Image: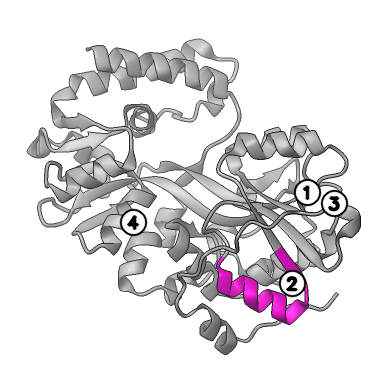
Amino acid sequence: MKDFIASRRSTLKLLAAGTGVLAAPAIIRPAFAQSKVVNITTYDKFVPQSFIDAFQKETGIEVRIRLTDDQGKQYNVLSAEGATPSSDIVTVTGHRLSQFIGSNLLSPLDTGRLKNWGNLAPAYKGAPQLTVDGSVYGVPLLAGFEGLARNTDYTKASDSWAIMFDKEYKGLTSYIISDFLQITMRYQGNDGDFVTYEGKPEEAQAATNKARDYLIQNKDMVRKYYDAGSEVQQMFVNEDIYVAHSWSGPAAKLIMDGHPIEISVPKEGTYGFLYSFNVVKNGPNTDAAYTFLDAILSSPEIGAAMSRQSGFASAFGGVDKVLNDKERAAMALPQEQTERIQFFSSVNRDMKNEMVDKAVAEIKAA
């Protein structure tokens, strides 16, 4: 199998625009018909077309993209295909990883086959976020996180979630209740992801109630609870709010559009999700899959192009040096802030969902 070797100059030339679109979803033919092909199930705008073109030209391996928009659908397709999957690589979020592994749908990653494995950013070196029972189960790609967003024209700098409760901004804050409840638990020194509360329902309920009561006590701080990213964007644009809890994507869009918004990870930390490329067990083209994965890790320009298209932060090293100042402010974090992100776990999610949902209803009703 020919190795993918791209020079920095050729990569820069191919990815300069960084705004290519994914190839149109191809019909994936049965495994016996595959030859020099890699079949990838992923999300829209995750793989730059310029990279696909360069990879195909360099290796002779055809890249066939099947788009997905839901982890459950992707899981159901793989489960139905059983021992004869049509995908070689799938895109799994970290908190769903155990479901795919538990159903024997993924193969552990042989990192020894990836010469560029060391090109991950420091926070992802060795991919601890994707390591289960000593085996790595994917290549980290893109990360989204819950951040502190603020209008820099009207607020003071802050490295703490405490600003969300600062009376100076009374009536000028906003958040998604279910998400910010978990952040408030973390702010109070408790486990907002409920991992440590497995088998400890009373401890979990006490921590949930403490955060619930604090949000009710500070309900006058909130201009509006929101559900969709477009809502918090509009409130910032209209200057209805100055400070908010926001997922990184909506805030990044505001920054890229020139609005005076900053997003950061406060010192108390936050939660996030990680997308990874994962090798499918019994995939028809495993060698081509590894060639593709090694290639996508080969250059920070590729990671930068993926960030520009998706709006998520890259897990690849050196991307911050490729992005311009505005892109860096929108999609890259300082290393110390990246290390404050705790990625959501699949552990104890039933208890978490039940208690959070109940608390949300109580906050709304208060």
- Front residue of this view, candidates 92 and 46: 46
Give the mark nearer the N terminus: 4 vs 1: 4
Q: Which residue is mark 4?
A: 252
Q: Residue 232: which disc? A: none
For disc 4, the neighbor class at 10 Å (few under 14, some 14 to 19, many from 20) is many
State the CA–CA distance, disc 4 to disc 1.
Answer: 32 Å
> Looking at the picture, how far across and down is residue 50, in whole percent?
57, 74
The kind of secondary structure element at disc 3 is loop
Q: Which residue is mark 3?
A: 30
Picture residue at 51% right of the left edge, 44% below the top: 273
Mark nearest the camera among 4 and 2 is 4
Q: Which residue is mark 2?
A: 115
Mark nearest the camera among 2 and 1 is 1
> Looking at the picture, how far across and down is residue 205, in whole percent?
44, 13
Q: Quadrant of the N terminus?
A: bottom right
Q: Which residue is mark 1?
A: 280
Give the mark nearer the N terminus: 2 vs 1: 2
